[in-house]
Image: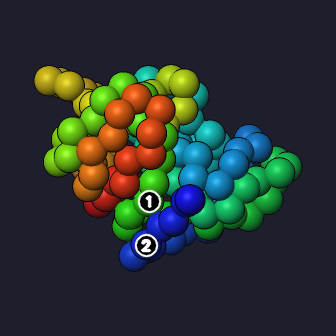
Amino acid sequence: MQYFQDVLTLTVTATTVFDAFDLIGFDDGKITTNDAPVKGFAKHPATEVGMDVGVVVLGTGRVKAVGAIAKGALVKTAAAGGVQTAGAEPANPFARALTAAADGEFVTILIR
């Protein structure tokens, strides 16, 4: 089950198609690279380029864990989609894990 708690949502005009809860970059498209800058996560899918979609930029949500993630760990984007532990010197950590998760499970993150 997916859920989110939004504190601040911005509307973006999609530059790519994406699913709900995909991580969105500052180009207003789906992130597909490791350790990319994150604007937020999509509240709804964008089924065509040019759609206006809400993106949570401050709040909590559940995303797929790539590798094990410990509760409280900083996270960054994963090239395969989802998030991974940020490690020692990430360029773009964007959230903190509120729950622990094993590889492939969902982790609740706090974007702030």
Q: Quadrant of the N terminus?
A: bottom right
Residue annotated with mark 2: 5
Indicate whether 80 appears above or below 100: above
Considering depth in this image, is 95 or 37 the residue closer to the camera? 95
Residue annotated with mark 1: 61
| Label 2 with label 1: CB-CB less than 8 Å | yes
| Label 2 to label 1: alpha-carbon separation | 6 Å
Considering depth in this image, is 8 or 103 the residue closer to the camera? 103
Name the side, left or right, on which 29 lies relative to 8.
right
Name the side, left or right, on which 110 lies relative to 45.
left
Q: Position of residue 65 (x, y in %)?
A: 42, 36
Amino acid type, mark 2: Gln
| Residue at horizontal 60 percent and vertical 63 percent from the top | 43
Name the side, left or right, on which 107 lies relative to 40.
left
Q: Position of residue 10 (x, y in %)?
A: 54, 68
Amino acid type, mark 1: Gly
Q: Quadrant of the C terminus?
A: bottom left
Q: Say what secondary structure mark 2 lies in.
A: strand
| Residue at horizontal 35 percent and vertical 33 percent from the top | 102
Q: Earlier in the sequence, mark 2 or mark 1?
A: 2
Q: Say what secondary structure mark 1 lies in.
A: strand
| Residue at horizontal 53 percent and vertical 45 percent from the top | 23
Neighbourhood count class around disc 1 (C-alpha, 10 Å): few under 14, some 14–19, many 20 upward: many
